[in-house]
Image (cartoon, grey):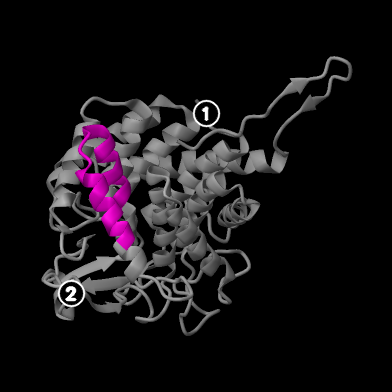
């Protein structure tokens, strides 16, 4: 079913007036974005399927689409984007494409050397299972959760993010690094418990969320990027950043992961402490003196050259999506209003690419990691993913429908 906002049409016999529950502007911003996305994402999908070989587009590098292998942390976002195009349009052609791009990720269910399988499988197989109930998809999700569970460390009670001796991480002398991004993997664990009946995954997710709430956040409710735990004592060895400006700065996407992750925890547990915490993080985001008027944050709230710092569109898209969900639980109009403003900003030519440009990516001006000189002021596949998710949620909210 097309999820473009539905008018509550009531033809009044006496007057012939048609009443609609939404304003034309509210309806059209979703319609317009769908029309643009059909062309942009369609172009990107064509490029990703040239020669009959499926590839995974992640960004633009040196003027060309950069494709990633299936074990890259962003590998599931494009399949998820295709599933969202199906959800937004009802066109089965998108579902066919989405299924193909999903099933090339099957071996990820055995990946154990990093934590990002929640993104990789949740966004691909998770959306496919939700929308199409394809046989075997639940089993992939459960098997992936089993792999992620191997990274749970009993003493600190957390899911370890990176292997401490792998790549540049090994230079930091970490034992058990946990990044705030890891909150986004917990939905996979909650779902696996639902599908399997095994409560182990759920207990791990709750333990991780609780310890992260305890250790990752400052008094102003901003969060650190990385917390390193001692595997023997469970104590915190240090707090720092890997992708932000400084150890004590507020990396924008980290704040976005936090508000989204704790909102998700509330959805699955009903424990109000998680929603309360999401609201505290939201207050930090919205009230920070360096939040721009258009609500598209700089890559770090404390970056030294603001306002001459890159914006991070991906952070705005993630927060907007989270805010629509928060609104459904709190009925606080602030969250919907601010999410709407973010969507309006991202739908302007300042951030959304013109049709036929940007190699088919929908949004421009995201930031991957400035400290690593990686993906700076470029399109990123996860920015598109969360933008489309936010549009879907906006449509449900304005139609008075549940999100899930």
Magenta extent: 185-210
Task: Give the numbered dot on residue 161.
Answer: none
**Callout 2 crowding tier (Cα within 10 Å): few <14, some 14–19, many ≥20:** few
Q: Residue furthest bottom?
A: 304
From the viewer's perspective, tell me whether residue 176 is left or right of residue 267. left
What residue is shown with label 1?
2
Residue 6 belongs to magenta span: no
**Residue 199 located within the stretch drawn in magenta:** yes
106 with respect to 101 (left or right):
left
Residue 377 shows up from this direction: no
Q: Which residue is mark 2?
A: 168
Which numbered disc flags the more N-terminal residue, 2 or 1?
1
Q: Is residue 49 left or right of residue 328?
A: left
Q: Position of residue 207 (x, y in %)?
A: 27, 56
Q: Quadrant of residue 17?
A: top right
Horizontal and vertical percent position of residue 322: 48, 52
Binning the other alpha carbons within 10 Å of mark 1 as few (below 14), some (14 to 19) or many (20 upward) gives: few
Compared with 126, 56 (above or below) is: below
Residue 133: where, in percent of width, then height? 31, 26
């Amino acid at each position: 079913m097309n999820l473009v906002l539905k008018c509550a049409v009531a033809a009044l016999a006496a007057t012939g007036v048609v009443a609609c529950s939404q304003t034309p502007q509210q309806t059209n911003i979703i319609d317009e974005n769908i029309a643009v996305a059909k062309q942009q994402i369609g172009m990107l999908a064509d490029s990703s399927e040239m020669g009959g070989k499926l590839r995974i587009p992640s960004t633009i590098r040196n003027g060309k689409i950069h494709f990633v292998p299936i074990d890259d942390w962003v590998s599931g976002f494009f399949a998820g984007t295709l599933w969202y195009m199906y959800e937004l349009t009802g066109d089965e052609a998108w579902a066919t494409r989405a299924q193909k791009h999903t099933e090339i990720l099957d071996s990820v269910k055995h990946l154990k050397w990093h934590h990002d399988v929640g993104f990789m499988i949740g966004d691909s197989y998770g959306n496919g299972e939700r929308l199409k109930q394809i046989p075997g998809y639940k089993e992939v999700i459960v098997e992936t959760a089993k792999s992620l569970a191997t990274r749970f460390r009993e003493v600190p009670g957390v899911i370890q993010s990176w292997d401490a001796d792998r790549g540049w991480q090994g230079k930091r002398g970490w034992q058990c690094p946990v990044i705030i991004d890891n909150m986004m993997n917990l939905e996979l664990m909650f779902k696996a418990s639902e599908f399997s009946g095994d409560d182990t995954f759920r207990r791990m997710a709750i333990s991780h969320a609780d310890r992260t709430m305890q250790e990752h956040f400052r008094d102003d409710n901003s969060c650190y990027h990385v917390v390193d735990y001692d595997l023997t004592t469970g104590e915190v060895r240090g707090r720092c950043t890997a992708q932000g400006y400084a150890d004590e700065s507020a990396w924008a996407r980290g704040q976005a992961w936090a508000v989204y992750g704790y909102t998700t925890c509330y959805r699955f547990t009903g424990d109000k402490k998680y929603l309360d915490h999401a609201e505290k993080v939201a207050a930090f985001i919205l009230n920070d003196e360096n939040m721009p008027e258009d609500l598209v944050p700089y890559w770090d709230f404390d970056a030294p050259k603001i306002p001459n710092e890159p914006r991070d569109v991906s952070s705005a898209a993630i927060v907007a999506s989270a805010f629509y969900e928060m609104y459904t639980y709190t009925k606080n109009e602030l969250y919907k209003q601010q999410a709407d403003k973010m969507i309006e900003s991202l739908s302007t030519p300042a951030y959304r690419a013109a049709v036929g440009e940007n190699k088919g990516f929908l949004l421009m001006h995201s930031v991957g990691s400035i400290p690593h000189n990686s993906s700076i002021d470029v399109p990123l596949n996860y920015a598109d993913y969360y933008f489309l998710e936010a549009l879907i949620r906006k449509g449900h909210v304005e139609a008075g429908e549940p999100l899930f």
